[in-house]
Amino acid sequence: MEGKAEGKVIVITSGKGGVGKTTATASIGAALALDGNRVAVVDMDIGLRNLDVVMGLENRIVFNVVDAVKGRCKLKQAAIRDRRIKNLYLIPASQSDNKDVLSPDEMVQFGEKMRKEFDYILMDSPAGIEQGFENSVASADEALVVCMPEVSSVRDADRVIGLLYARSITPKLVVNRIIPEMVERGDMLSHEDMVEVLSIELIGLVQVDDHVIISTNTGVPLVLQKGSKAGDAFRRIAMRINGRKDIPIEVPQTEGRFWKKIGSKFGLGK
Amino acid sequence: MFDNFFRKVLGKPDSKDVAKKRLKFALIYDKLEVSDDVLTCLHRDMVEVISRYFEIDKDAFKMDIHHSEDLSALVVNTPIIKAKRKKYPAV
């Protein structure tokens, strides 16, 4: 993009697996593109790729991130264009390589090339804190840590936050899969608890939502699903990343909260 | 719903508060974790220093790091067999 400012590389990480990094990457990437940015989402989980199926682009893969980084193809050849959302591109992971096929140095160079082509480059980091994580973080300007309100996820997030700080990156927290009913009855860590334990800035709260699985079943982006609370939450996160600091962080609420409140006034329920 | 009600009446803490407390300790512990090498060297040096003044049972020498509310303590326990009777060099 000639004449335009360089893009930003944002790594999405968590330490623990299965907390929703890939869903977050796909959704925030799609939302940033809907807001008019040129976006590339990069699957860094070499050997265990999944961002492609989540985005419904799995049958269009020709080249992958290893090809692009090693210069075996042009950036444009590895970037699969999403036909539903303008300006959204996926660079898939390689499924056959070993994860130490790439090095942090190569990733720094790759990041420099990507920043010239895109406004936002989202790196979907693999679980763990080994080579794959190192590679995902190498070229990052910013970081999002995805964490569930649950002890093992919080502990691993703390570890990852420490590693990011060591690289002079100040990460922001996405709390994912909140179950408002459990938070309300005191059986799930609230976002305040998590912010206190992790001492980190919050960027968004995402509640548990059936639409996430439905969206991955069909490969239709979550942010295009009408009435998806998780999709809406990811759209607001994208807007905040895009500089809209005025967008408030909405706290997920239980359904029928009004009646419960009335009930509790009369000593019913909790 | 009623489980919850009785729990509150009985004054049991919310499970999330238990989680929060456990997490805080786990994170402190994780950060204070000392590597085995460090502990092994410290162990060796302490045995050596104490041995200058006392005859001790080296095999029964125990060293541990204890964590409590808001501090960590290095706890050393060793049986003394006898004091050594010799002149110590002036400091």
Image (cartoon, helix red, strand yellow):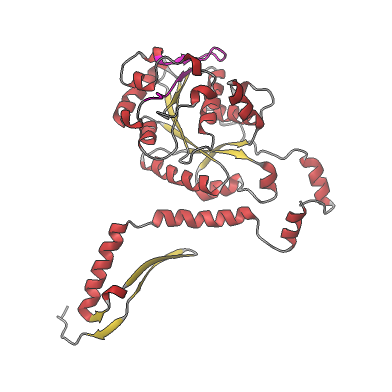
Q: How many marks?
A: 0
Left or right of A117? Residue A104 is left
Q: Position of residue A180 (x, y in %)?
A: 68, 42
Foreground pick, A9 / A231: A231
Residue farthest along the right direction in this orientation: A266
Residue farthest along the bottom direction in this orientation: B85
Can I make out residue B60 in this image? yes
Q: Residue at x 52, y 44 (%)?
A: A153
Extent of the magenta region: A78-96
Q: Magenta: predominant secondary structure element?
A: loop
Can I make out residue A88 in this image? no
Considering only vertical position in the picture, is A147 above or below A233? below
Considering only vertical position in the picture, is A175 above or below A270? above
Query: Which quarter of the figure has residue B34?
Result: bottom left
Left or right of A82? Residue A97 is left
Q: Position of residue B90 (x, y in %)?
A: 15, 81
Magenta region includes residue B23? no
Considering only vertical position in the picture, is A263 above or below A9? below
Q: Position of residue A85 (x, y in %)?
A: 56, 15
Q: In which quadrant is the C terminus of chain B drawn?
A: bottom left
Foreground pick, A198 / B83: B83
Q: Residue at x 32, y 80 (%)?
A: B79
Q: Residue at x 38, y 20 (%)?
A: A114
Magenta region includes residue A87? yes
Q: Position of residue B41 (x, y in %)?
A: 25, 63
Residue farthest along the front direction in this orientation: A96
Query: Which quarter of the figure has residue B67?
Result: bottom left
Left or right of B83? Residue A167 is right
